[in-house]
């Protein structure tokens, strides 16, 4: 898993030259919530990191992840999924946000398991090679089986 490198292409190239099996950068949330959830990051920079990884290393497998329960709406989640696929993302994890400490952002909503399953099926329909989507899914969840997909 990598940061967004603040959009710096040379840092991305350095990571790709190391030859990782999978390049991972998590978008974490929908664009509308970025200023609250990831105030030091930029959504389009995150999408661009995935796109650039694919362009710089066409054979590499790419992965991203998003957390639900922060106040996002279904159309926003679907738009992120579409943008990730358009950027060349192969694998996707979708999990429930759980507040790690009192000073972190509170959970807005606990998402029902059937909603996670809807997103998983939609992800497969969109062309992701594999999607792990459940309340307990975490970014590295099912990494081995995803890699073989």
Image (cartoon, grey):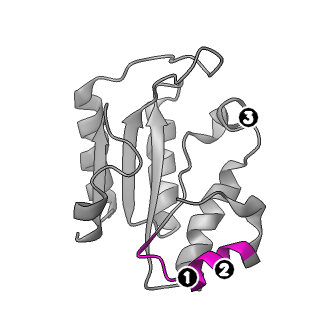
Residue 16 placed where, x, y %? 57, 80
Q: Give the SS element for disc 1.
A: loop
**Residue 80 or residue 34, whichever sits in front:** 34
Q: Is residue 67 above or below residue 128?
A: above
Q: Which residue lies at the image location 28% right of the left edge and 60% below the top edge?
A: 130
Q: Is residue 21 magenta?
A: yes
Q: Give the SS element for disc 3.
A: helix
Residue 60 placed where, x, y %? 44, 79
**Position of residue 36 in the picture relative to residue 66 (left or right):** right
Residue 32 placed where, x, y %? 65, 35
**Residue 59 or residue 104, whichever sits in front:** 104
Q: Which mark is residue 18?
A: 1
The residue wearing badge 3 is 35
- The answer to whether the residues at label 2 and label 1 have Cβ atoms under 8 Å apart is yes
The residue wearing badge 2 is 14
User: Marks 3/2: CA distance?
Assistant: 28 Å
User: Which mark is first along the chain, 2 or 3?
Assistant: 2
User: Marks 1/3: CA distance?
Assistant: 32 Å
User: Which span is picked out in magenta?
Assistant: 11-22
Quadrant in the picture for residue 25:
bottom right
User: Marks 2/1: CA distance?
Assistant: 7 Å
Q: Which residue lies at the image location 55% right of the left edge and 39% below the top edge?
A: 29
């Amino acid at each position: 898993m990598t940061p967004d490198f603040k959009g710096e292409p040379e840092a991305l190239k350095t990571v790709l030259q190391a030859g990782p099996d999978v390049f991972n950068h998590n978008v974490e949330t929908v664009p509308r919530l970025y200023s609250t959830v990831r105030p030091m990051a930029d959504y389009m920079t995150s999408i661009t990191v995935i796109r650039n990884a694919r362009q710089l290393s066409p054979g590499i497998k790419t992965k991203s992840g998003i957390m639900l329960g922060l106040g996002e709406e279904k159309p926003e989640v679907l738009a992120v999924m579409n943008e990730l696929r358009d950027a060349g993302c192969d694998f996707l994890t979708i999990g429930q946000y759980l507040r790690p400490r009192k000073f972190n952002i509170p959970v807005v909503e606990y998402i029902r398991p059937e909603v996670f399953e809807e997103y998983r099926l939609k992800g497969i329909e969109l062309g992701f090679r594999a999607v792990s989507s459940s309340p307990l899914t975490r970014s590295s969840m099912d990494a081995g089986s995803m890699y073989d997909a």
